[in-house]
Image (cartoon, rainbow, N blue to C red):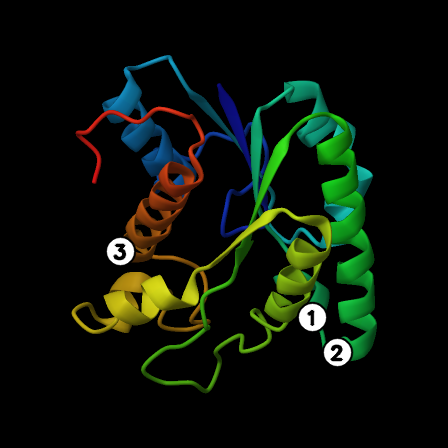
Amino acid sequence: MKIVCLGDSLTGPTPGARYLDKYIKWSDLLQIGLDAAFGEGRIEVVNQGKAGETSAGVCAALEERLLRHSPDVVVLLIGANNFGHNAPREEASVRLRADLREIVRCAQAAGIRVLLLQYPVPRAEVMDKVWTHCDAGNPVADEVAAETGVSVLNLRTAFDEAAKTCSLASLASPVDGIHLNPGGEIVLARTVLAKLRALGWPATWPGVIG
C-alpha cells in the first residue's frame, strides 16, 4: 500500500527535499506508526508537500505529485495559501472549491481513495501576527467531501484537546500560530493514523495500535 501526503508547508518543504537534519514532519511520524503496525516496508508514505502551495498549484502538478506515484490513498491538506495576501474570501473559496473538485475527480478516476484534512484553528498566546486566514477554507472542504463522497477529517478537535495539556507554542509557531512545532506534528500524525484505521485503510489492523 502507498499513501501520498499532498499539500503546502504544513506537509513538506519541497517534494524530494532533504529536511530530516532540521525537523520531522507529520508524514514521517505517520510512516513510523504504520511501520510499527504492519512492519517496515509494507506501507510507503510519500511526502509531496510544497511550501507556499495553493490548490491551483496542486491541480497543475497532479501528474507529477500524485498520479505518477500510483498510490492507494492521498491525504490532502491544502487551501490556506488561497486566502493569503488579502485575497477576497469569496473569490478564494470559489477557486478552492473548483480545485478540490478537480483533485478529487482525478484521484477517483485513478482509483485513489481520498482523505481531505481541515486545518486546525491558527492560534498563539499573542495573536498579533497569527495567520488567522489559514482555516478559512475548511467549510469548502466539508462541502466538497459531502458532494463527492470522500472522507474528511477536521483537525480542530484534536488540537483543541491537545491544547488542554500542552502549550500552544509546543503545538505551533508562537508567531504565525499555524506552522507546526514537534507537538503539533505528533498530534496531526496520530489523528490521521487513527482516521485511517477507522476507515479501514488498510482493511486489517493489528491490535497493537489503539
Of residue 150 and residue 185, the one placed in the foreground of this image is 150
Amino acid carrying label 2: it is Arg
Residue that mark 1 sits on? 83
- Decide: marks 2, 1 in contact (CB < 8 A)? yes
Q: Quadrant of residue 89?
A: bottom right
Q: Quadrant of residue 83?
A: bottom right
Residue that mark 3 sits on? 183
Q: Position of residue 91 (x, y in %)?
A: 83, 73
Residue that mark 2 sits on? 89
Amino acid carrying label 3: it is Gly
Numbered disc 3: secondary structure:
helix
Q: Is residue 62 above or below residue 156?
A: above
Q: Is residue 19 above or below residue 133?
A: above
Numbered disc 2: secondary structure:
helix
Of residue 9 and residue 59, the one placed in the foreground of this image is 59
Inter-mark Cα distance, 2 to 1 = 6 Å
- Taking 189 as reference, is 112 left or right? right
Q: Position of residue 185 (x, y in %)?
A: 34, 50
Q: Which residue is painted at 68% across and 66% down in the image?
A: 140
| Other residues around mark 1 within 10 Å, as few (<14) / some (14–19) / many (≥20) | many
